[in-house]
Image (cartoon, coloured by chain):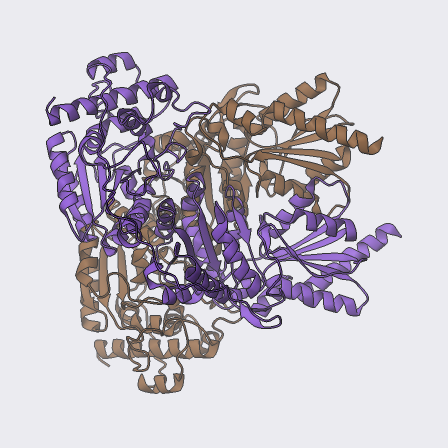
Chain colours: A purple, B brown
Amino acid sequence: MADNDFRRELGQQLRVDSVRMSARAGSGHPTSSMSAADLMAVLLAGHLRLDYSRPHDQHNDHLVFSKGHASPLYYAMLKAAGAITEDELASYRQLGSRLEGHPTPRIPPTDVATGSLGQGLPIGVGLAYAGKHLDRLPYRVWVLCGDSEMAEGSMWEAFEHAAHFGLDNLTAIVDVNRLGQTTETMVGWDLDTYAARARAFGWHAITVDGHDVDAIDAAYAAAEATTGMPTAVFAKTLKGKGVRAVEDLPGKHGKPLDDPEAAIAELGGRRDLTVAVARPDRSVQPHVFSTEGGTLPSWPVGEQVATRLAYGEALAALGSIRPDVVALDGEVSNSTHSDLFAQAHPERYVEMYIAEQQMIATAVGLQARDWTAFASTFAAFLSRAYDFIRMAAISRADLRLAGSHAGVSIGPDGPSQMALEDMAALRAVHGSAVLHPSDANQTARLVAEMAQRPGISYLRTLRGKTTVRTGPEEDVVIGGSRVVRSTEDDHVTLVACGITVDEAVRAAESLAAEGVRARVLDCYSVKPIDAAAVRKAAEDTHALITVEDHWAEGGLGDAVLEALAESAEPTAVRKLAVRHMPTSGTPEELLGAEGIDAAGIVEVAHELLARRLSVTS
Amino acid sequence: MADNDFRRELGQQLRVDSVRMSARAGSGHPTSSMSAADLMAVLLAGHLRLDYSRPHDQHNDHLVFSKGHASPLYYAMLKAAGAITEDELASYRQLGSRLEGHPTPRIPPTDVATGSLGQGLPIGVGLAYAGKHLDRLPYRVWVLCGDSEMAEGSMWEAFEHAAHFGLDNLTAIVDVNRLGQTTETMVGWDLDTYAARARAFGWHAITVDGHDVDAIDAAYAAAEATTGMPTAVFAKTLKGKGVRAVEDLPGKHGKPLDDPEAAIAELGGRRDLTVAVARPDRSVQPHVFSTEGGTLPSWPVGEQVATRLAYGEALAALGSIRPDVVALDGEVSNSTHSDLFAQAHPERYVEMYIAEQQMIATAVGLQARDWTAFASTFAAFLSRAYDFIRMAAISRADLRLAGSHAGVSIGPDGPSQMALEDMAALRAVHGSAVLHPSDANQTARLVAEMAQRPGISYLRTLRGKTTVRTGPEEDVVIGGSRVVRSTEDDHVTLVACGITVDEAVRAAESLAAEGVRARVLDCYSVKPIDAAAVRKAAEDTHALITVEDHWAEGGLGDAVLEALAESAEPTAVRKLAVRHMPTSGTPEELLGAEGIDAAGIVEVAHELLARRLSVTS
């Protein structure tokens, strides 16, 4: 078969397999697969350099399905490449199958999960950044995008950053089939408008008939030959191409074809072509950064240090110890103090500007290439990328996040800059760790722990200074806690984290002067919480006060309640947290206004103990 | 004084006042204010039509400071307009002052809170949409944007939608001072690149010297004269303009000037000019949609109905009853069933395409103009707009959100489409209500309740059908619950919501067959939770099992634990929730795999009761 005949046949096979899979599963997106089948046939049979037998080979090209709902097409490609069998293809969308409704890394060589639109291209930017600036390997990154997802702002963050980073190893293939789930896109088939936008964002843009295999081939070749900028191929296609019952018709999104057998016949019947996909260039070895070594910083007990500064110093030190550590920041590095890493390791610092979604996506892409990425911004602004963090968990990504300026304790900047929902949001991410150290030594140790830990871990740091209480040699571990003060017969336990540890200690000192013995438990690991320490405190004192600079929902207090839920031990718990919309003010005024300062804790301790006294007397 | 002299003097006054305010407060962003002072002087003195003495007048123009950190400039404008006194200006950033670090609606006529970058322009799109297509009033919307925030994808969602909606009443004024917090922006002073991007997105674009008052004046006049498309004015400015110690210098972001007195002298000293701001055109009355009236839908007990369908039917009915109800959807209206509203009230339906951030921002803008906006998408994808929802709470916005396709019960589409963190995220929004009805009648009643309720309320709906158990005449209220079955001496309480109510009922039936009496409590209001009903169940049965199709963190289980926290009553609580990363599968398989189906509940009930038996015997 001539090359273009083969590719046309392969395109039809990908369509047929997409129809078959969706029909068998009773759900799926065959029409969205059929529009892009020729685009993917040409890629697989002529441009992609990926050894499917060695899916984790570092030299491989990367293919990201940003339009993850076209998973039938993706899996049909895997079958054509010999990576999966016909039997496995038949398991699509069934429990236990690696072939889920939207691709995940459970099926190699898939790097990341997609299915929330507008994320694949941003992650592709991260993969391409790794190839160009860190690994320094000649692999290319190909991203199949839908046209509906071009409405997501995150796509334009990707466009801007890819050009800014000079990612000529990145190609976006946009399947412009015009039809979304319910209606035509805003741009329709106006490919020139897409191309003008891409060019204005610094890309090489090509428009093409997405069913003309020679034209597609030429477009990819032009992309490969372009230097200094990424290339976008905008392809005019027909949704449901090849089957009259669905082709270019509205109302055919996301459902199997009514008559799959007729459709398969119309497409020329089942085929079993296999493609000998090109192998990658293995001649170049990945770049390894040289490191000078070093030790984690520590501070003498009693010193006043902001935990955000400790984060920066620890991260810079970690970068000197480990060549795989990379830092990203959302243009606030002099606030989060990732600037200390940037100064020490400029080649491993990625300035993401004010584009938090692209920051997280880049980190996800970097970790897929085994870089240990730490991403930081104000904790409040991590909320901007919450969907990306959620999806990163489905990607099984190892992601280290640091959010500074937690809580009302930031003071005069006001509530827009205060993270008050971050612990709740991050606790509800699968497999996450949520860490909120109270002092500099805890922070440094936790940064090192995060680097070792798989999954998503989040470090919450403070704007203002706190007292170093943790000795430099003390154990600080994810899942741990620290008893700040205790006696054998404490009356009450104050459970705190971050800024409220200082307040709890002051409260305990004040209570001690009245003869009330308060234990102070520093739960710097909010998830996993040190349930044993919490339960022991409950058993010992039967009265707990949790204190956090965070909304009352989903943070430390709820973590403590969960730790106690299954014990039938009667323990009175009072949860102190932020309960009013804060305004500007000094940190002290704002902590006081919410009753999460020492005075507020003392007052509640009195109430709690008086109530217990009245119950027991 | 000639017009341009006056405006130059006014610009200097705005700078001087910005310097004074920040110096007094000891914090703030004077240099970011100084770059835009001439832009705002020309606006205030010649183009804005806003009666500051009647800040809530529906005919007023709207001014949104998308670069909210330039709040000193904003408040200096209020002083110049006579809206606040010099004394109030002096209260900037102090506890109790309306002049917070970033603007909020606490100080009229401010429509919304800003301070998380990239949100003001999207909200401006909502305000302008209201003016153009709903109110049909001639007011204009002016948005002052920073250049750093142009890196936020949400800005490009705003650009695309504003052009798509034909919003020629919207003007974006972009203060291109080139310098961000830590570094130069990606685009720098390349105004032509910004203009090319704006034009590619369908805008009229003008570039201008941002310190030439005549040129600015002409640009605004051109914007006012432009029909059919919005206008962006890209203004080249100097950060810290007018004071040599800071002008166009890096490292001068977000801090008071070192020598404010010298700076004020260099700026020509303090001035007390006042501006007679133009009054709005009050000749046109706002459009009111005609409504045919109607009643909320209801379903007979026993019927099988998806709550997402009930949402659509109830919303369509509400639209027939109330002319102020508007619906928005993120291009999945045939999934969320807002399509029923769109069909019934096409002029009040806003298709937002796949741009969830812009969807929420539009809703925030609409409610600022007193429209009752319901915004829907897959619940999982509301996470894309989490920062916008967080900020909406600071905006004191009345916002109604509906998220469909909750939990693993959606089945084969896989985890990217399953909302599993939504209740945690939304509970941690200040003043929110989180509602998860188990049947169609509950849903319809809650939709009506949401329309009445100030603040942010969130309705979580199901993909699959559930049994109607709530009678059409029963009370269903925010903060309520429903006892599905109970006796006077129940052994255990099953607390459920949404899909798990059906499972809990099946479990109770199965337990009843063994002689175990299980109460079933339907907590359709997860926040506020019906604490009284939960506590009564705890007192009556001393054993609670919470069951939710959501991660274990931050959802129903935590809400129940909080309700019980302060009672020293010994109650064993077992929290059943999703604890593994789901895959594709049938709803039944996936509920079973997580132990949140009837069989899983029965098993845990056995364990719990056996343990209690062993403790008491």
Q: How many marks?
A: 0
Residues A352 and B398: in front is A352
In the figure, is residue B571 to the left or right of A87? right
In the figure, is residue A3 to the left or right of B233? left
Q: Quadrant of the N terminus of chain A?
A: top left
For residue B464, above or below residue B290: above
Q: Where is residue B422 shown, x and y percent of the image?
A: 50, 41
For residue B330, above or below residue B335: below
Using the rendered image of the protein, determine whether residue A586 is visible from the camera's viewpoint.
Answer: no
Residues A323 and B116: in front is A323
In the figure, is residue A227 to the left or right of A316? left
Residue sitting at x 46%, y 38%: B402
Residue at the right extreme, as displayed:
A617
Using the rendered image of the protein, determine whether residue A403 is visible from the camera's viewpoint.
Answer: yes
Residues B251 and A468: in front is A468
Q: Where is residue A32 shown, x and y percent of the image?
A: 28, 29
Residue B379 figure quarter? top left
Residue sitting at x 72%, y 31%: B608
In the figure, is residue B350 to the left or right of B580? left
Q: Where is residue A443 shown, x and y percent of the image?
A: 54, 61
Q: Where is residue A477 shown, x and y percent of the image?
A: 58, 53
